[in-house]
Amino acid sequence: MHTDTERCVRAVQSKDARFDGWFFTAVLTTRIYCRPSCPVVPPKVENMTFYPSAAACQQAGFRACKRCRPDTSPGSPEWNARADAVARAMRLIRDGVVDREGVPGLAGRLGYSTRQIERQLLAELGAGPLALARAQRAQTARILIETTDLPMADAAFAAGFSSIRTFNDTVREVFALSPSDLRTRSARGKQSHAPGTISLRLPFRAPLNPDNLFGHLVATAVPGVEEWRDGAYRRTLSLPHGHGIAELTPHPDHVGVLLSLTDLRDLTHAISRCRWLLDLDADPVAVDEQLRTDPLLAPLVDKAPGRRVPRTVDAAEFAVRAVLGQQVSTAAARTHAARLVTAHGVSVDDPRGGLTHLFPAPQALATLDPDKLALPRSRRTTLTTLVGALADESLKLGFDSDWDAARDGLAALPGFGPWTVEAIAMRALGDPDAFLPTDLGVRRAAAGLGLPSTPAALTAAAAAWRPWRAYAVQYLWATDSHPINNLPD
């Protein structure tokens, strides 16, 4: 979008928050870059130039605005609506892969050479993977500086910097303030939290309807791994350097998150997974505009706009849970999952609540005895085959997956029909166009609206909803009185 100057200028002059994260405005006279909704008086048109990423602005010598804090904008929705190499690379960079594995590790995950990935990112985002990762490190550093009392040296290494000098230079260059000055500015009105926790706000593009988002997560929560407590959804996280607990609270203009991490190097990864779980980088206005073109679906959208797709923090976990939930009630699926967690999950300590375990990794589940599973024989085979493929990595699932390749891999496993494959594509892989025409709730809702209820006819009718059929499913499910549609008390 940054190449459409006229459209960008209109967004800046109208302070349209919907475009935050889509592009950034750099002001040639002040050498500052802003989000489109920056509250200051818009600069003259001839003094504006536009970039597709904060990293590109920083690489061009601009520093972040202190008023609108563009580094805290929601992520571009484009990267979650595509499955090409650039979009997958952006999701991985946002997840901290470059800091952990370097550019060769990023390229290896995507099946490209380092040079190819650098060229593609530079062409589309105006910055290579190192510059993009550097911008993210700066944002992580700012969070640690402003929300914790960590010594600056500890904050530097936790944010992924290799030296304190690089940390200091980067913070000054990006924010035009020293790390100490940043902490001093943020100390005013700062709330105190339990030692070892990090509190921050996750921005999103309005509107956001929290009912089905949090309702779905809580109604299907696995005991010991997830819970709803004091108005917040809480769950354990398995992270690269340890484990953590995330506490997510919906608010009108943001989602509050309280993170407890065993290793602060996992902060970037944890934030990325929380945003992914709640689909916070979506563009609900664009989604809802498309769905409203169907006169039968439009009343549902108008009644409660801004529905998101409830996702997962771990694709392999969701795939296992999808198999456990085949042809059984929500309560039964939770019971089966809880038994696996108790038998094979790693124990954790949660002083604030009732979380007890991490969901077991595929490698741990690969050793389970199928005869001890209270499941039909065919589903036992499906489950053991799945965890075996995930454990030996012959099947790879993640939000960086190629959607078509992942579907093919899942469909090749015994017991994987269209419902299971599409459910995983929707909630684990993040395909916004995944569709469940065989789902009983979808078919019942479709019939109630006057839409065809047979899978083939419904799929044909749903062509008008593309590429947002996964969101249409949320609106169809919302016609039911199931607990997944209600924000818990």
Image (cartoon, rainbow, N blue to C red):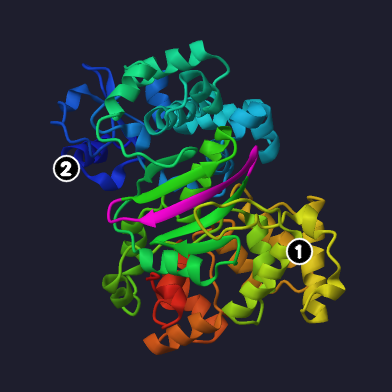
Q: Relative to residue 431, is residue 332 drawn left or right?
A: right
Query: In the figure, 70 relative to 172: above or below?
Result: below
At 37% from the left and 60% from the top, the residue drawn is: 287
Number of marks in picture? 2
Select label 2 or label 1 by which is in front.
Answer: 1
Q: Tell me where residue 49 appears, x and y as whole percent.
A: 28, 26
Q: Alpha carbon of mark 2 to alpha carbon of mark 1: how far?
A: 56 Å
Q: Tell me where residue 400 appears, x and y as whole percent.
A: 60, 47
Query: In the figure, 448 relative to 342: above or below?
Result: below
At 15% from the left and 26% from the top, the residue drawn is: 44
Q: Which residue does the numbered mark 1 point to in the structure image?
A: 343
* Amino acid type assigned to the residue bearing label 1 in the image: Ala
Label 1 SS = helix
Sequence-wise, which precedes: disc 2 or disc 1? 2
Res 321 quadrant in image:
bottom right
Q: Tell me where residue 306 appears, x and y as whole percent.
A: 33, 62
At 46% from the left and 64% from the top, the residue drawn is: 228
Res 175 quadrant in image:
top left
Q: Circle 1: is it few (<14), some (14-19), or many (20+) Cα within 10 Å?
A: few
Magenta extent: 239-253
Image quadrant in which the C terminus is located: bottom left
Query: In the figure, 7 relative to 459: above or below?
Result: above
Q: Does the magenta stretch include residue 327?
A: no
Residue 71 appears in the figure: yes
Label 2 SS = loop
* Amino acid type assigned to the residue bearing label 2 in the image: Ser
Q: Circle 2: is it few (<14), some (14-19), or many (20+) Cα within 10 Å?
A: few
The residue furthest top is 165
Q: Which residue does the numbered mark 2 point to in the structure image?
A: 14
Q: Do the residues labelled 2 and 1 touch (CB within 8 Å)?
A: no
Q: Relative to residue 387, is residue 321 drawn left or right?
A: left
Image quadrant in which the N terminus is located: top left
